[in-house]
Image: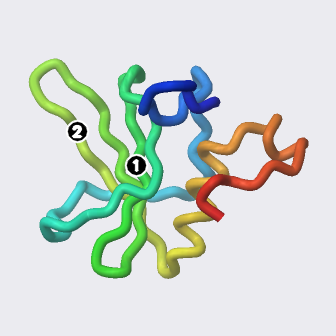
């Protein structure tokens, strides 16, 4: 994954993205009009992930693009740090972990 230079694409996920074991996805719910997207993957894929924050609650939104409509699910946990750890596991490449590069959100 890398950020494209000179444009506003999100992270490019590997062809097979790895969702951490035990992630339980629930149908998306309305969380108010103010949802802050802290990070996201590129929309060039059929599945887009967003790290969101609303009302002090952090969650990951997964949108699967469909022919007729998009299917939205969310992952939340008891603590925001658990959600953030799951996000990092999904989007940080092994290459970055080996080089010791920190996420841009830390």
Which image quarter: residue 1? top right
Left or right of residue 79, residue 34 in this image: left
The disc label shown at residue 50, or none? 1
Left or right of residue 29, residue 52 in this image: right
Q: Which of the two labelled residues, at mark 2 and mark 1, occupies the earlier sequence position? A: 1
Q: Considering only vertical position in the picture, is 92 above or below 67? A: below
The residue drawn where x is 48% and y is 80% is 78
Q: How is the image coloured?
A: rainbow
The residue drawn where x is 61% and y is 38% is 18
**Whole-percent x, y for residue 79 in the image:** 52, 80
Left or right of residue 1, residue 37 in this image: left
Q: Which is more foreground, mark 2 or mark 1?
A: 1
**Whole-percent x, y for residue 86 in the image:** 59, 58
The 10 Å Cα crowd at callout 1, few under 14, some 14 to 19, many 20 or more, is: many
The disc label shown at residue 102, or none? none
In 3D space, how far apart are the residues under numbered discs 2 and 1 (Cα atoms)? Answer: 14 Å
The residue drawn where x is 45% and y is 27% is 7
Q: Considering only vertical position in the picture, is 48 above or below 74? A: above
**Whole-percent x, y for residue 41 in the image:** 46, 37
- Which type of secondary structure does the marked residue at label 2 adopt? strand
- Which type of secondary structure does the marked residue at label 1 adopt? strand
Which image quarter: residue 28? bottom left
The disc label shown at residue 71, or none? 2
């Amino acid at each position: 994954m890398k950020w494209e230079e000179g444009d506003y694409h999100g992270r490019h996920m590997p062809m097979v993205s790895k969702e951490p074991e035990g992630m339980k996805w629930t149908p998306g719910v309305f969380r108010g009009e103010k949802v802050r997207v802290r990070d996201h993957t590129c929309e060039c894929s059929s599945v887009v992930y967003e790290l969101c924050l609303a009302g002090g609650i952090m969650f990951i939104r997964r949108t699967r693009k469909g022919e007729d409509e998009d299917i939205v699910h969310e992952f939340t946990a008891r603590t925001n740090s658990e959600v953030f750890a799951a996000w990092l596991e999904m989007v940080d490449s092994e290459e970055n972990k080996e080089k010791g590069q920190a996420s841009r959100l830390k």
